[in-house]
Image (cartoon, rainbow, N blue to C red):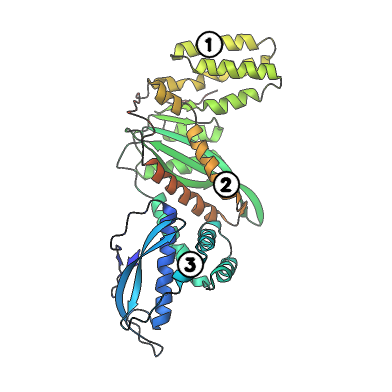
Amino acid sequence: MAFDEKTRTPVALEQAPAPEDALRTMVATLVQETLRTEFEQFVGAAPYERTPERRGYRNGSYPRAFKTRVGALTLSVPRDRAGLFRPSLFAKYERSEQALVLAMIEMYFHGVSTRKVNAIVEQLCGTSISASEVSALTRKLDASLTAWRERRLTDTPYLALVVDAHVEHVRREGHVRGTAALWVVGVTPDGYREHLGVWMGPSESEASWASVFQDLVERGLHGVTYVVSDEHVGLVAALHRYFPEAVHQRCQVHYQRNALSKVTSERLQLLTRQGLRDAWGAPTREEAALRLARLITELRPDAPRLADWLADTHEATLPCYVLERDDVREKLRSTNSLERHHNEVRPRTRVIRIFPHEASLLRLLTALAIEQNDRWRTKHWLVEPTFIPAEEPMRRSA
C-alpha cells in the first residue's frame, strides 16, 4: 500500500499487479512501511511537521520493482527535493532477502517476542526494527486479517459446508493447552470452495461450534442444504440448532476409523474396511443399505460389539445419496478435502510447536486460509455440481 505524501491517504501503486497471495501482500506492506520510516528519519520530520532536525522536503515518490522469494513487488519509493535519499533497504534486502523474509514471517505469524525479532533482523540485515514499529505493523496486518474474517457472505449461497477441526498447542494462563482450530469450507453453486473463516476454541464443544455457526449466520451465510462433518457430539448439536433443515452426512473416513478401532484382528479389520468401501460404492442408497446389512451379518459371529455398533450407526453415513451425481457424492461424503488443507497447515505450525498466545495462532491460520482461497479461486472443485434440496431435516445420528 502506498500513501500520498501530502495527504497521507492510501493510493494505489502505479502499474501494481494484483497480489497473487496473502503472504506477498504482507511482505510488501512491511517493506513499504520500512521505506516510509527510513525516509522520515532521513528528512527528520513527519509530513507537515516543523522540527529543527528537518534536513529536506518531500517530492512525491517513484515506483520501484523489487524481486523477493515470495514474488515480485512494486513499491513506491519516497523522494526528496534534492534527490539525496538512497534507501539502504534494497542493498541489505538483496544480500539476505531470504533470511529477512523468514524473519518477517516470524514477526507476523509466529508471535515471537519483539526483542527476538529485532535481534534477528539486526544480525542478518544490519538494521533494527523498534518495538513500536513491530507493534504498528502487526496492528495493520491484524486489521486486514480481521476484516477478512468478518467479511459479509451475502453475495452467493453456499449450498454445502465441509466442517472440521484440528488441535494446536497454545500457552494460556501459564500452561500449554490444546486449542481447537475450527474450520468451515463453503461450496458455491458453481463448484468453487472457499474458507469462510477461522475460529479458535478451547475444545470442540457445542458452545465453541455454536459460536462459529452464529458468526456465519450473522455475516449472511445462506442457502445451506448439506453439511458433512465428523460425529462429534458438540458439533452435531450445534449444526442441528443452526442448520436444522440441512442434510447431515457423517464423514465416511472418520466413521471407518471409528469402526476399525473396535477390533484388533487384522482379518476383521480387512473385512470391515473392504465391506464399508463396497457398501459406500453402491449406486443407490437402498443398495448401500443392503450391502451394509450383509457386512453386519458377516461380522456378528466374531465381532458382535462392532456389528451392533454398525447396526446402530450406519444410517448416518448414507445421506450423501441425496447428491445424484457420483463425482459430487465422492467429494462430499467425507471431510478429506479439508483434512488435506490441515496437512498443509501442520508443517507451518510445527515450526512454532507451542504458540505464545491465541492471537499468533489465529494470525497464521487466517493468512494460510486466505492463501488457500486464492489457489481455490483458479479452478472449479466440482464441475457443474448438482445439489438436491434437503428432503428431511438434519437429525443427530445414533
Whether the residues at callouts 1 and 3 have beta carbons within 8 Å, the answer is no
Taking 26 as reference, is 361 left or right? right
Please identify the quadrant where the N terminus is shown. Answer: bottom left
* Residue 8 seen in this snapshot: no
* N-term-proximal mark, 1 vs 3: 3
- The image quarter in which residue 298 lies: top right
Residue toward you, 50 or 2: 2
Whether the residues at callouts 1 and 2 have beta carbons within 8 Å, the answer is no
Helix or strand or loop: what does disc 3 sit on? helix
- The image quarter in which residue 378 lies: top left
Residue type at mark 1 is Arg
Q: Determine which residue is flagged by label 3.
A: 93
Q: Determine which residue is flagged by label 1.
A: 291
* Residue 384 seen in this snapshot: yes
Residue toward you, 155 or 338: 338
* N-term-proximal mark, 1 vs 2: 1
Q: Residues within 10 Å of mark 1 (few under 14, many from 20)?
A: many
Residue type at mark 2 is Pro
From the viewer's perspective, is the residue at label 1 or at label 3 nearer?
3
Please identify the quadrant where the C terminus is shown. Answer: top right
From the viewer's perspective, is the residue at label 1 or at label 2 nearer?
2
Q: Determine which residue is flagged by label 2.
A: 347
Across and down, in percent, residue 394 comes to 44, 26
Residue beneath the point at 51% across and 67% down: 95
Query: Is residue 333 placed above or below 304 in the rendered structure?
Result: below
Residue type at mark 3 is Tyr
Taking 159 as reference, is 91 left or right? right
